[in-house]
Amino acid sequence: MEINLLPHVPTTQRYRFQIALIVGLVVILFSAFIGFQIWYKTNQIEKQKVVLQQLKSSHDLKGNQLNQEQRVTRLVQSYQEEYTKLKSADINWVPIIDEISKKLPSDGRILQMNWSDDGIIKMAGEFSSLESIGQYLQLLNRIEWVDDVQFVNAQAASTNGRIQVFLNVKMNTESLFLLNSIMPGGDKK
């Protein structure tokens, strides 16, 4: 039996420096890998932020353009509505009523007349025969500012044997406006 008087050194202590070096190297490599991953993800996030910022500014620009176009559209619609109101308000109704009544046959008469902003004159009248009504419709259709004459209803009046008629006369407001600007007060120049 041999007796060793030297202290017993475990084999792990002999390689302590090499193990520490390998562990340190692994820690450094792992830290570098983690650092690279953090840097890469941060770079990607920054690029996405830039892209999102560009998309947001593009969206805001398009939104502003759309709002501007909507404002212009509303302005144009408002202008057209105001123009139509002013144009219909500017019509001199005296020559119009005068021309409608001049076309009236001798046996007919107009009982009621209403006009609306959309260019329709609603009339109620009395005539002695259907022939008179037909003649009157033809004469009204020949007026240059009349687009269409619609026969709404006719009924026989029980008291005097006459026929009550309801008509809708659709006016061409453009030609009527031009006609009124040419003939103020109904007199042709």
Image (cartoon, rainbow, N blue to C red):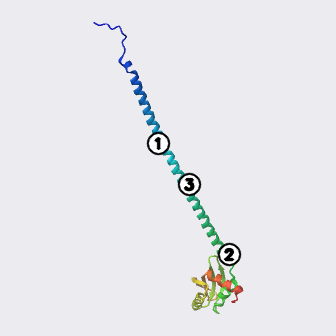
Question: Which residue in the protein does label 3 denote?
Answer: 57
Amino acid beneath label 3: Ser
Question: Which residue in the protein does label 1 denote?
Answer: 40
Cα gap from disc 3 to disc 1, whole angstroms: 26 Å
Q: Nearer the viewer, residue 154 or 39?
A: 39
Q: Is residue 54 above or below residue 11?
A: below
Q: Earlier in the sequence, mark 2 or mark 1?
A: 1
Q: Is residue 109 above or below residue 15?
A: below
Q: Nearer the viewer, residue 100 or 86?
A: 86
Find the residue positioned furthest to the right.
185
Amino acid beneath label 1: Tyr
Question: Which residue in the protein does label 2 denote?
Answer: 86
Q: Element type at marker 2? A: helix
Q: Quadrant of residue 31?
A: top left
Residue 149 lies left or right of residue 47; in this view the side is right
Nearer the observer, disc 2 or disc 1? 1
Q: Nearer the viewer, residue 183 or 71?
A: 71
Q: Is residue 169 above or below residue 50?
A: below
Q: Which quadrant, please, contains the C terminus?
A: bottom right
Q: Residue at x 62, y 69 (%)?
A: 76
Badge 1: few (under 14), some or many (20 or more) residues near its Cα, within 10 Å?
few
> Residue 102: image x %, image y %?
66, 90
Q: Earlier in the sequence, mark 3 or mark 1?
A: 1
CB atoms at circles 3 and 1 under 8 Å apart? no
Q: Residue at x 37, y 21 (%)?
A: 15
